Image: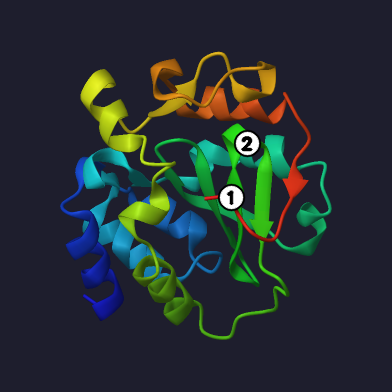
Amino acid sequence: MDEDFAGFLQDFGPAIDKRHVPPSSIDRYRGKLPDQLLKYWEDQGWCGYADGLFWTVNPQEYEAVLEAWIGDTPFIEKDVYHIIARGAFGKLYLWGERTGYSLKIFAPGSYCVPSIAPSPIDDMDFEIQLFFGGLSPDGSDFVNMFAPALKRLGRLMHDEMYGFVPALGLGGTSEPEYLQKVKAVEHLVLLAQLAPLEVITTPPF
């Protein structure tokens, strides 16, 4: 195990709700995603970390989410993207086949943060190591709402997230008492329909 992923596991703790990754999925993304990421999948499965704060996901299950968020944007012409991970509140981590980790989306707020100047990556395996090595529990949280949400609503399953009800795009409020467990894919597709995706350079949290 490389040093960056070992550090990630130290910070985020053991995996939960682990799902085995079938060889067909490894074959599907061979040459599209880094070999090192596929090795993580083989070793760890698709699963949650830090009690469900951060999740590695099957990109195929999130294709509808990807299409809903960037299918009608200029991003779709810049690279071929895959959602490789998500947060408990709907932060989406997109991997470009040429540009690596060059785009993230915060679905509840309908904004994305692209790399300032995405360019082709020569060493994708090293890039994915840096991705996991650069993650932190604090950076994956949303204004410290995870701990109270976990206590009140319980641990998420692999297909769930914490969502504001009503959604922020429908005039909802980003207060902990308005969080509910919702189905992740369905909720993320819904959020994409409520407001246009805004491009920002500095995330508010």
* Pointer 2 residue: 109
Residue toward you, 29 or 182: 182
| Above-or-below relation of 127 to 182 | below
- What numbered label is drawn on residue 204? 1
Left/right placement of residue 171 relative to residue 188 reads right
- Disc 1 marks a residue whose amino acid type is Pro
Assess disc 1: are there few (<14), some (14-19) or many (≥20) residues with their C-alpha within 10 Å of its C-alpha: few
- Disc 2 and disc 1 in contact, CB within 8 angstroms: yes
Label 1: state its secondary structure.
loop
| Above-or-below relation of 97 to 48 | below
Assess disc 2: are there few (<14), some (14-19) or many (≥20) residues with their C-alpha within 10 Å of its C-alpha: some
- What numbered label is drawn on residue 149? none
Residue 93 % position (x, y): 52, 53
Label 2: state its secondary structure.
helix
- Quarter of the image with the N terminus is bottom left
- Where residue 87 sits, quadrant-wise, is top left
Residue 27 % position (x, y): 45, 58
